[in-house]
Amino acid sequence: TMVGQFVFTFKSNFNNGVGLQMVENVPFCLELARIVIQEQGYGLPALSTLFFLFGLSSVVVGTVFYLLGKFEYGRVVYFFPSHVLVGCIGGIGAFIIATSVEVSTNTVFHFTLEGVEECFIRHMHLWLPVLAFEVVLRILLKGFGDKYPLLAPIYYCLITPVFYMCLGVTGIDMNTAAKAGYFFPPISTSGSVFNKDLLDIFTIINIGTISWKAVVKAIPTMVSLTAFSLIHVPINIPAFAISTNVEPDMNAELIAHGYSNAVSGIFGGLQNYMAYSNSVIYSKSNGKGKASSLGIVSVSAVIFVYGPTMASYVPRCMAGTLLLHVGIDLFIEGVVESYHDYDRLEYSGIWLITVVMITFGMDAALVAGIIAALSTYAVQSITYQYPIRGAMTATRLRSSAWNRSFEAQEILMDKMKGRQRIYVIQMQGHIFFGNVTTMTDEIKRKLKEKCNADDKPIVVILDFSRVLGIDSSAAQTIAKLKDSILTNYGIELV
């Protein structure tokens, strides 16, 4: 986590991203451990092989990320339709809400009567403070959020002292509150985890004791781990870009992930990525900039050493309130606010992904996203045509406005600033996420050719009169194309 955060601080185009270990890869790590145990059993030689495999798998993941970015294959992620990404945002929001209930009540939430009874009835005393803190925060943000951007992070910091004040007023001592479940249990009683065993993870690998037979047997698992690792970044980066309204350079982000994973692997660490949910929390708390990002690295280092002792003094309601607030915001952004932005088919896909994610988890939601994307593709591509019908100067076309003034006609006939300098590109058919990238690349190619031939147009007109339909992903891409052409070529797009 620390390595990822440090690398993203200097290599990522986002100024508010948060690096995190890929917790989704834990099942693969367990499988690697089982392979090593079968070959070497337990002991230091087995640990040496296992940590070598951990590091090697991270280096492999980093190498793949780097090569994808280096050879500019990042554009493939733009084939992910926006409604799938928005569905993931809504699903992650619902998932975080459920996690806030679990963290607050120290239970595992299930969508069953027993699960509801366990979390909300038997542990009502644990989640009611979370709900109260969240309601107060919503009221404060409604009235003062625009005026005080740091209101939310300051509020989170005040939850712990306010909770201790409530304990003092009610006469409840900390031991009683801890037994009732209001605090996280202590992990260590030594006051610190910093001892001579802490650095073993960096010194345990011994080339002479590595079982190369186990390494060979682990290759299929590492291949699967690498493929699985590649799934998350193309989802997280565009989704985070949508949440923060930032235009990402996917190739640069892939290269950054390549460096972070390779460096982590060299030190025997596990895979990492820019975590979407953590980055959104950090962004919504107005976190940004290199200094703040390096502060996260420093705080992570301190927590690594002293975290177990510090955690036992933090009330569960603080973590629960933070998770609940962010989860509600993401759910509203992904499911509620998107209602008028998508057609019925796309919006149904958003709900499908959200429900599947909260019910069956992230992996099943990715499958649901693929189904939603393919369904949209199938429906919208029935009348598929190549999106560009033709391109020409306005000298070959005539407007229906025949009653122009003499001055206007004179301007249009001028070879330096008239019809000769107006470039018209005609669209056709259905424009959707499956062909809009081809369309924008072709438009940019045509403009580059015109500029290189000293025939730079003053205005580019996109003619959509023969277009039968445009989906939301294509509309967003076309909107961004206007700014891109103006910035890169100095040409006005209308």
Image (cartoon, rainbow, N blue to C red):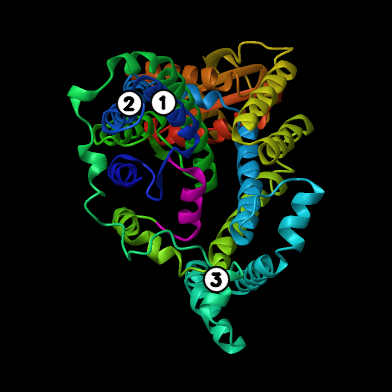
Question: Which of the image's four quarters has the C terminus?
Answer: top right
In the rendered structure, which disc, 2 or 3, sits on the residue that comes first in sequence?
Answer: 2
**Nearer to us in this view, 109 or 245:** 109
* Residue 178 - label: 3
Residue located at (50% from left, 26% from top): 77
- Of the residues shown, which amino acid type is indicated by label 2? Leu
In the rendered structure, which disc, 2 or 1, sits on the residue that comes first in sequence?
Answer: 1
Please provide the residue range marked out in magenta: 274-287
Residue located at (68% from left, 30% from top): 403
Q: Is residue 221 above or below residue 263?
A: above
Q: Is residue 405 above or below residue 303?
A: above
| Residue 472 percent coordinates (x, y) | 65, 33
* Residue linked to disc 1: 32
Q: Residues within 10 Å of mark 2 (few under 14, many from 20)?
A: many
* Residue linked to disc 2: 53
**Figure label count:** 3
* Residue 212 - label: none
